[in-house]
């Protein structure tokens, strides 16, 4: 059976959502962050050397990294769901948005989180970090004008990967200036599969 190695309050919540959308039988193996450091426990390194989540194990395979897991699950279990037809323009756009989430959008948000712990020492970096966050969120917001999804007219893995980005931004109060993103995020979080994922995954500080 498919196993998801799930760290609380982490990117693995979006993989639970994806699995619920696909209707796959699965098991969650739970891990808790250290109460002081907020880091994952060393026991995750027994599953993958990086000791990070999400990680899945399935059919003798271990797959790490959100984008790779999304591709694997959709390829293996999707039966044509949750992605455009390979070779189409929509598929090219899908690949862009799928990888944009971690390749571009999350970096400045993570930098803002880490440098916030440095106090005044982080002041020289703050303008550039804030500029990059605004650049990415503005790009996403404009793209969603008149759209319900990042690609095409149905949910895809690109939506699932990017919702975590928006949840991270919203948790820091960064979506107020982006009405399209706020509306889109509310719609994604209202999906029945998303809500089932919250029930299965446990406390999730970034969700509703």
Image: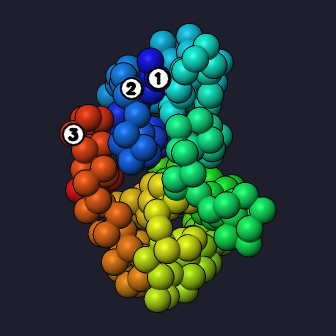
- The residue shown at (31%, 69%) is 187
Does residue 86 show up? yes
* Residue 133 to residue 52: above or below: below
Quarter of image, res 203: top left
Q: Secondary structure at mark 3?
A: helix
How many angstroms separate mark 2 from mark 3 (CA)?
A: 14 Å
* Residue 127 to residue 36: above or below: below
Q: Which residue is tagged 2? A: 26
Q: Name the residue nearer the viewer: 132 or 57.
A: 57
- Answer with mark 2 or mark 1, whichever residue precedes in sequence: 1
- Residue 34: percent from left, percent from top: 37, 25
Q: Name the residue nearer the viewer: 110 or 27.
A: 27
Q: Is residue 92 left or right of residue 205?
A: right
Q: Name the residue nearer the viewer: 116 or 87.
A: 87
Q: Secondary structure at mark 2?
A: strand
- The residue shown at (49%, 74%) is 153
- Tell whether label 1 touches label 2 (CB within 8 Å): yes
Quarter of image, res 202: top left
Q: Which residue is tagged 1? A: 2
- Residue 75: percent from left, percent from top: 62, 41
Q: Nearer the viewer, mark 2 or mark 3?
A: 2
- Answer with mark 2 or mark 3, whichever residue precedes in sequence: 2
- Residue 63: percent from left, percent from top: 62, 28
Does residue 124 show up? no
Q: Which residue is tagged 3? A: 199
- Answer with mark 3 or mark 1, whichever residue precedes in sequence: 1
Counting labels gives 3
Q: Secondary structure at mark 1?
A: strand
Q: Nearer the viewer, mark 3 or mark 1?
A: 1
Quarter of image, res 122: bottom right
Circle 1 Cα neighbour tier, 10 Å, few/some/many (<14 / 14–19 / ≥20): some
Circle 2 Cα neighbour tier, 10 Å, few/some/many (<14 / 14–19 / ≥20): some
């Amino acid at each position: 059976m498919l196993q998801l190695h799930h760290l609380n309050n982490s990117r693995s919540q979006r993989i639970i959502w994806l699995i619920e959308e696909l209707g796959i039988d699965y098991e969650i193996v739970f891990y808790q962050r250290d109460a002081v450091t907020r880091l994952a426990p060393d026991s995750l390194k027994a599953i993958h050397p990086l000791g990070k989540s999400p990680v899945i194990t399935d059919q003798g395979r271990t797959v790490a990294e959100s984008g790779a897991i999304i591709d694997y699950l959709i390829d293996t279990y999707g039966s044509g769901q949750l992605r455009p037809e390979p070779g189409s323009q929509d598929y090219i756009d899908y690949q862009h948005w799928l990888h944009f989430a971690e390749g571009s959008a999350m970096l400045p948000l993570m930098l803002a989180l880490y440098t916030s712990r440095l106090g005044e020492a982080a002041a020289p970096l703050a303008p550039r970090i804030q500029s990059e966050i605004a650049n990415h969120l503005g790009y996403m917001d404009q793209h969603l004008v008149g759209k319900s999804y990042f690609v095409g007219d149905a949910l895809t893995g690109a939506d699932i990967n990017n919702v975590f980005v928006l949840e991270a931004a919203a948790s820091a109060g960064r979506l107020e200036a982006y009405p399209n993103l706020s509306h889109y995020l509310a719609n994604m979080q209202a999906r029945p599969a998303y809500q089932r994922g919250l029930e299965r995954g446990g406390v999730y500080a970034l969700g509703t």
